[in-house]
Image: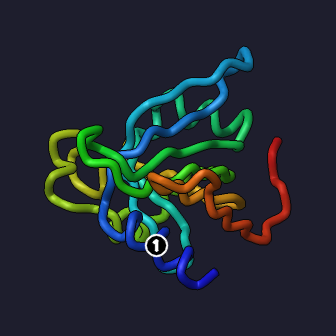
Amino acid sequence: MPDVINKVLKILDEPILCSFSTITNDGKPWVRYVMAHADKNLLIRFPTHVSDRKVQQIELNNEVHLTCGITDPSVLKPYLQIQGTALLTEDKEVKLGLWHDQMEVAFNGPDDEDYGVIEVTPYSIELCEVGKQKADVLMINQTNTSK
């Protein structure tokens, strides 16, 4: 499994465009793009406006899904299907750690009251590779915390 973990970390090492799915208040899926990044413990983070609907959706149902890895369909490479639970954090250290100047188009600096960070704790990561019929699945010990 270390090889799978290393491949997963390589994909999530730099901020990457991912589709992020939540469940709406009326039980329907909702998908949007986010720029996500993971630490060495596979905790995935991305910025959000605290006032965004995804925050409300996560508060009602914290089960989420991300698809990450292919941003150019002409370049087929490994990609990830990630299931996990999400929460909003407004922790100052976390916000500063994720902050970069390119975010100034969306926020008035790292102290902006509407700037928050979504943290996704994965419990299942599928590493899908072109030419392989079956994905490698990394199951992560976690108590299901869905609401």
Location of residue 96 with respect to 73 vertically, above or below: below
Locate residue 58: give its quadrant.
top right
Q: Which residue does the numbered mark 1 point to in the structure image?
A: 7
Residue at image coords 48%, 56%: 129
Where residue 56 appears, x then y in whole percent?
60, 31
In the displayed image of the protein, which residue is found farthest to the bottom? 2
Q: Look at the image and tell me in which quarter the N terminus lies.
A: bottom right
Left or right of 142 on screen, residue 98: left
Residue at image position (51%, 51%) is 118
Q: Is residue 108 visible?
A: yes
Q: Nearer the viewer, residue 25 or 124?
A: 124
Q: Which residue: 25% across, 42% down? A: 72
Q: Is residue 125 above or below residue 10?
A: above
Residue 97 in percent (x, y) is at 34, 71
Residue 5 image position (x, y, % from top left): 55, 76
Query: How many marks can you see?
Result: 1
Q: Is residue 39 left or right of residue 22?
A: left
- Name the amino acid type tagged 1: Lys
Q: Quadrant of residue 106?
A: top left
Coloration mode: rainbow
The residue at the point 33 percent across, 54 percent down is 16
Q: Is residue 37 left or right of residue 127?
A: left
Q: Secondary structure at mark 1?
A: helix
Residue that extends furthest to the top in the rendered view of this protein: 26
The image shows residue 138 at horizontal and vertical percentages of: 67, 67
Check the image and report above or below for 16 versus 1. above
Q: In front: 63, or 51? A: 63
- Please state if 124 lies on the left or on the right of 144 as rendered: left
Q: Quadrant of the C terminus?
A: top right
Q: Is residue 113 visible?
A: no
Which one is nearer the viewer's eye here, 143 or 13? 13
